[in-house]
Amino acid sequence: MTVPRLRWPLTAVLVTGPSMSPTLRHGDAVLVRRGDRAVRPGDLVVAVFRSRPDLLVVKRAVRARDGGWWLRGDNDLVTDDSRAYGVADVRGRVVARYWPGPRIFGRRGV
């Protein structure tokens, strides 16, 4: 995923790959908010794995762990999440999809 650094309160991010299907699909565009509230389990987040600092990902926060977050994709067939890369540091929380159709995201129980 190629996106600008998250500098503004709201940043647009383009989703690539199938790991968040069916919630988000390849080509979806989402709005990400930094610092509005603490991340909670079930939130969709944009994060960087500590073992892969070059990789910015959209995943679901599962639980706080080792000062960061354990993340999972919604597609159980794809394992490019904390199962492969370990703990991640959250950069922002996904608040809405604006393309191809609007959708507001709240918390989902895990």
Image (spheres, rainbow, N blue to C red):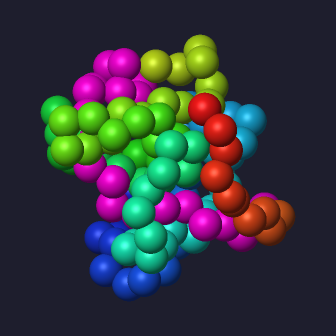
| Residue lying furthest top | 77
Residue 4 in magenta? no
What residue is shown at x 59% (from left), y 15% (from top)?
77
Q: In which quarter of the image is the C terminus?
A: top right
In the rendered image, the vertical position of residue 85 relative to residue 95, given as above or below: above
| Residue lying furthest right | 101
Residue 85 in magenta? yes
- Left or right of 16? Residue 53 is left
Q: How many labels does the image show?
A: 0
What residue is shown at x 67% (from left), y 66% (from top)?
96
- Left or right of 64? Residue 30 is right
Visible in this render: residue 25? no
Q: Position of residue 7 (x, y in %)?
A: 31, 80
- Left or right of 8? Residue 100 is right
- Left or right of 76? Residue 106 is right
What residue is shown at x 33% (from left), y 54% (from top)?
90
Visible in this render: residue 76? yes
To which quarter of the image does residue 25 belong? top right
In the rendered image, the vertical position of residue 65 relative to residue 86, given as above or below: below
Magenta part of the protein: which range?
80-100
Asked whether 16 or 78 is in front, the reply is 78
To which quarter of the image does residue 81 belong? top left
Q: Where is residue 32 in the image (x, y as percent from the top left)?
A: 50, 68
Q: Where is residue 62 in the image (x, y as percent from the top left)?
A: 47, 35
Asked whether 70 or 64 is in front, the reply is 64
Q: Position of residue 92 (x, y in %)?
A: 41, 63
To which quarter of the image does residue 76 belong? top right
In the rendered image, the vertical position of residue 100 relative to residue 76, given as above or below: below
What residue is shown at x 65% (from left), y 38% (from top)?
109
